[in-house]
Amino acid sequence: MGPLNFFRSFRTFVPLAIILGLLLAGSGCYYYGPPPYYPATTYDQVWESALRAAEDSGIRVTFTDRNTGVIRGATRANTNVDILVMRQADGRMRVEFNRQGPKDQDPGLQDRFFQAYERYRGR
């Protein structure tokens, strides 16, 4: 093999190597993984989370009816609270928070309840 044949093969080898290198470098993809999985929510899980969140947020629970989804209670600031746990038509669960009383007393009550509820739900 003379010097002329070496340069001919080198001229065809280098562009092919560059193209192959670019193809391999460009084919790398980052895998983000599957989206987070939240297991199906059951009525009992939502009910227990709402009940525990009510107690954590300073609501003294005075009445519960699991069948109708009603949790009633009061705070030290004379605020009455109704929490309703309902199953919607599409199968999802809904938690509704209603308060009766002066809103200027304990204005962060609803936020504390929903933060505790989300914590118990694992979100």
Image (tube, grey):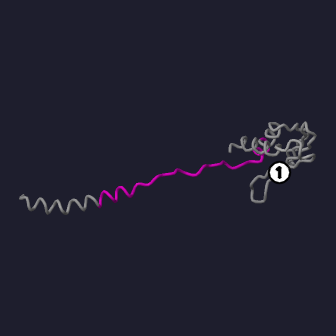
Disc 1 residue crowd, few under 14, some 14–19, many 20+, Cα 10 Å: few
Q: Quadrant of the N terminus?
A: bottom left
Judged left or right of residue 71, residue 16 is left
Q: Looking at the image, is 40 positioned above or below residue 15? A: above
Please, what is the three-letter code of the amino acid marked with disc 1?
Glu
Judged left or right of residue 4, residue 81 is right
Residue 104 locus on image (x, y percent): 89, 45
Q: Quadrant of the C terminus?
A: top right
At 36% from the left and 55% from the top, the residue drawn is 25
Residue 21 locus on image (x, y percent): 31, 56
Judged left or right of residue 108, residue 33 is left
At 8% from the left and 62% from the top, the residue drawn is 4
At 82% from the left and 46% from the top, the residue drawn is 110
Q: Nearer the viewer, residue 2 or 101?
A: 101
Q: Nearer the viewer, residue 38 or 104?
A: 104
Q: Nearer the viewer, residue 91 or 55?
A: 55
Q: Is disc 1 placed on a helix, strand or loop?
A: strand
Q: Which residues are magenta?
A: 19-48
Q: Nearer the viewer, residue 79 or 55?
A: 79
Judged left or right of residue 31, residue 100 is right
Look at the image and say whether residue 62 sits in the magenta stretch: no
For disc 1, the marked residue is 96
At 77% from the left and 48% from the top, the residue drawn is 43
Look at the image and say whether residue 44 sits in the magenta stretch: yes
Residue 2 locus on image (x, y percent): 6, 59
Residue 57 locus on image (x, y percent): 81, 38
Q: Residue furthest left?
A: 2
